[in-house]
């Protein structure tokens, strides 16, 4: 249910006709839900060079045959990044994360005190750093707990709104970066002044107290966080149909 809540909230943020750079797992679930409901013309692209795909099931990886089989066209990976992404042709990127910190920095590399001897070694960056730097905007999706929602990530795989005293503007990134972090508890948006995440909306049945308990820093909360609506009948039907797909 938590994955469904995240997917529904993100799918509702996507606009019909946008070019959406998609990661596997939760990002694919949200993108496919949007494409089957409110945004039928959402143009999905994957870092393997897949353009305009309509996946028949949740892909297991960016090389899943279902992505290429339904794509409008395939391009080399360098063209995907050099022309499509860095050329400013991607409206929104959807990213998952192992850790997210208070400024929207993402860790998908290592958990522990150092890169050389981590407690856990994660899959790594993939195309996430480039997506976060060049896409028009980015939405991060994560299951929230004090282990995943941390004051400072153990390793900055993907830059958010600021890394220490260095801002996105300092780094020269053209995209807006993470405009929202969506979890099974709520939606968090960066403060326009300092980039720190602020709780602005709550998932159905969740509370500010739960959000604070699952956050590894002193969480800031909007004066009146809005309440997200539960899935509609049509959204639930799509999610149910996707249950037989490979799990994200």
Image (cartoon, grey):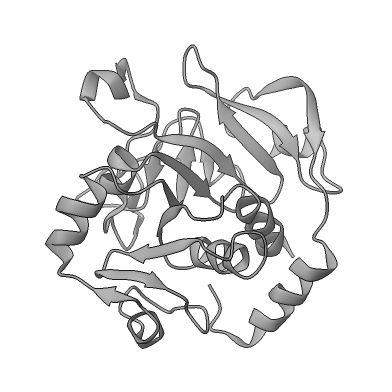
Number of numbered callouts drawn:
0
Camera sees residue 96 = no
Q: Residue at x 71, y 23 (%)?
A: 221
82 vs 94, nearest the viewer = 82
Q: Residue at x 40, y 36 (%)?
A: 105
Q: Is residue 192 visible?
A: yes
Residue extending furthest toward the top: 193
* Residue 28 horizontal/vertical position (percent): 50, 67
Residue 198 vertical placement versus 39 (above, below): above
- The answer to which image quadrant residue 19 occupies is bottom left
Query: In the image, is 190 to the left or to the right of 226?
Result: left
Query: In the image, residue 88 lies at what x, y percent?
Result: 27, 42
Query: Relative to 208, does residue 110 appear above or below in the rendering?
Result: below
Image height of 247 relative to 20, above or below: below
Q: Is residue 17 above or below residue 67?
A: above
Left of 89 or right of it: where is 17? right
Q: Position of residue 172 (x, y in %)?
A: 21, 25
Examine the image and state in which quarter residue 241 appears.
Answer: bottom right
**Which residue is painted at 58% across and 62% down in the image?**
30
């Amino acid at each position: 249910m938590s994955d469904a809540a995240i997917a529904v909230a993100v799918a509702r943020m996507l606009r019909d006709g946008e070019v959406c750079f998609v990661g596997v797992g939760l990002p694919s679930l949200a993108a496919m839900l949007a494409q089957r409901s409110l945004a039928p013309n959402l143009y999905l692209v994957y870092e393997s060079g897949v353009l305009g795909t309509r996946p028949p099931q949740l892909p297991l990886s960016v090389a899943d045959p279902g992505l290429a089989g339904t794509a409008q066209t395939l391009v080399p990976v360098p063209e995907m990044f050099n022309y499509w992404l860095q050329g400013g042709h991607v409206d929104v990127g959807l990213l998952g994360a192992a850790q997210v910190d208070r400024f929207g920095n993402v860790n998908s590399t290592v958990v522990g005190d150092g890169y050389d001897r981590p407690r856990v070694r994660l899959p790594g960056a993939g195309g996430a750093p480039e997506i976060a730097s060049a896409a028009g905007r980015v939405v991060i999706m994560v299951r929230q707990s004090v282990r995943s929602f941390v004051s400072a990530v153990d390793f900055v795989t993907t830059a958010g709104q600021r890394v220490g005293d260095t801002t996105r503007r300092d780094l020269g990134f053209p995209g807006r970066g993470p405009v929202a972090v969506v979890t099974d508890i709520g939606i968090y948006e960066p403060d326009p002044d300092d980039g720190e995440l602020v709780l602005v909306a709550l998932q159905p049945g969740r509370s500010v107290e739960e959000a604070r308990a699952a956050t590894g820093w002193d969480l800031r909360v909007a004066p009146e966080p809005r309440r997200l609506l539960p899935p509609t009948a049509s959204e639930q039907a799509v999610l149910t149909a996707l249950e037989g797909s490979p799990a994200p």
